[in-house]
Image (spheres, rainbow, N blue to C red):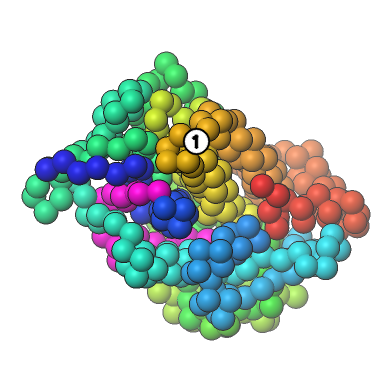
């Protein structure tokens, strides 16, 4: 069976669903094709720090009500270095500087519910998704759903299918360049229904490695410790995890940690990756399909959001005046998106390098980290640079 849409969106993660809502709002037809179930997509545990642009997009799309009720506004973050703890107050740069703590699963649920209400078509559990004739004027997507092979004829394809998706690989190797850094460690993360240890986040640089205290709600906490990617989860019973994270966060934070049974525990590797260009013919890559950032600073979701804002603008411009609109936005998409991507890559690489123990680090490197952290604690100018990046660079 063949059907037709203007834009085929591959993947119903944050990039795919934000794009679907933006296009729907502008009257551009789109179909989302996702290979997993809705429950799986919404159940994935990811970071939960929203930049202002993401918060404002939720509002603009009319899906921000629950976030406004349940999200937690932060106007500062904390950095622990050994036994020292200092606070970075975002209002040093402007009175309304903030980030919103609201889990990605909640964002996905709100987008998913609104998609049902608005009758935005999403095919979940589609298998064998394949992109065809992407460099022609008549691209299409095929997939199998409920045992039937379907073909979607479209005008553009948005590859929003994450790091492991099919879209990036559709671009011939002769056309694309991948820039990559794989870090020699991972993050062991734990979710537990215990109150957060501090009002704001705590990022720790400790001689035993990085640690982070984060939260999802006043009763749910998210903690991480740097570990080797070879570690086994069974070697990390809850007690060992709580002991380690308490040690690394330091003695001014540790007494405030409430321990409890974890209900999610996983190890994630850290990687930086950028694929250039982000467009080939009628295919546009967005979000994790085009780039990966290490989680330090929680930029992944926010970067997917800026990509789709740029792409939606370009497509809406193209479809203006009954399809006779300008292709300037489309032609400029890759360069515009990449400029912001590289700035976020720079910040997450810097923040990761500053906060972790690398196996190859020597005394000099450790002293450089200490000097840089000291500078951040003491200099308002250094903090202004950190804050500008942490709360989100302007589009
Ligand atoms: N066909 C269809 N869908 C696919 C395919 C495929 N071949 N491969 C993957 N997908 C789906 C995945 O199941 C997932 O739901 O594409 C979606 C991609 O979502 P994410 O990986 O979340 O990527 P993105 O939407 O770019 O979001 C980026 O969100 O998940 C976090 O770590 C991520 O913070 C980053 C941000
Ligand atoms: C998280 O809450 O999962 C989180 C918060 C901040 C980060 C990374 C992850 O920098």
Residue depicted at 52% across the width and 40% down the height: 317
The image quadrant that residue 236 belongs to is bottom left
Asked whether residue 235 is in view, the answer is no
Identify the residue shown where x is 11% and y is 54%: 146
In the rendered view, does 387 fall on the left or right side of 19?
Answer: right
Residue 339: x %, y % from top left: 64, 35
Label total for image: 1
**Occupied quadrant, residue 246:** bottom right
Q: Is residue 358 magenta?
A: no
Give SS at disc 1: loop
- Residue 29: percent from the left, percent from the top? 35, 49
Q: Residue furthest left?
A: 147
| Residue name at image x 39 percent, y 30 percent | 282
Vertical side of 123 occupied by 221: above or below? below
Residue 217: x %, y % from top left: 55, 78
Q: Which residues are magenta?
A: 28-51
- Bin the neighbour count of mark 1 within 10 Å (Cα to Cα): few under 14, some 14-19, many 20 and up: some
Residue at mark 1: 325
Relative height, residue 98 to residue 8 (above, below): below
């Amino acid at each position: 069976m063949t059907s037709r849409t203007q834009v085929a969106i591959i993947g119903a993660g944050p990039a795919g669903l934000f794009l679907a809502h933006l296009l729907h709002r502008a009257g551009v037809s789109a179909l989302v094709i996702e290979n997993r179930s809705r429950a799986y997509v919404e159940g994935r545990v990811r970071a939960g720090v929203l930049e202002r642009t993401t918060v404002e997009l939720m509002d603009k799309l009319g899906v921000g009500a629950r976030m406004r009720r349940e999200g937690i506004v932060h106007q500062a973050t904390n950095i622990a270095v050994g036994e020292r703890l200092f606070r970075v107050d975002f209002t040093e740069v402007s009175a309304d500087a903030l980030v919103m703590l609201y889990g990605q699963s909640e964002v996905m649920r709100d987008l998913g519910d609104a998609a049902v209400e608005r009758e935005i078509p999403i095919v979940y559990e589609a298998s064998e998704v394949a992109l065809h004739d992407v460099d022609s004027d008549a691209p299409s997507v095929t997939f199998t759903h409920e045992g039937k092979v379907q073909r979607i004829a479209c005008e553009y394809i948005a590859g929003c299918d994450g790091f492991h998706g099919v879209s990036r690989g559709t671009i011939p190797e002769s056309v694309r360049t991948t820039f990559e850094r794989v870090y020699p460690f991972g993050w062991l993360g734990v979710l537990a229904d215990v109150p957060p240890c501090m009002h704001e986040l705590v990022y720790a640089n400790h001689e035993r490695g990085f640690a982070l205290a984060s939260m999802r709600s006043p009763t749910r906490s998210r903690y991480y410790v740097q570990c080797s990617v070879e570690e086994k989860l069974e070697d990390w019973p809850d007690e060992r995890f709580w002991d380690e994270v308490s040690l690394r966060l330091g003695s001014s934070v540790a007494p405030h940690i409430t321990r409890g049974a974890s209900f999610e525990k996983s190890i994630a590797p850290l990687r930086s990756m950028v694929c250039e260009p982000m467009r080939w013919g009628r295919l546009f890559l967005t979000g994790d399909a085009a780039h990966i950032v290490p989680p330090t600073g929680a930029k992944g979701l926010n970067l997917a959001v800026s990509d789709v804002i740029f792409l939606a603008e370009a497509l809406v411009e193209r479809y203006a005046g009954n399809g006779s609109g300008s292709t300037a936005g489309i032609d400029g998409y890759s360069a515009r998106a990449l400029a912001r991507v590289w700035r976020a890559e720079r910040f997450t690489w810097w923040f990761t390098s500053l906060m972790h123990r690398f196996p190859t680090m020597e005394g000099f490197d450790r002293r450089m980290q200490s000097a840089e952290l000291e500078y951040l604690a003491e200099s308002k100018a250094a903090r202004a640079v950190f804050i500008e990046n942490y709360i989100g660079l302007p589009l």
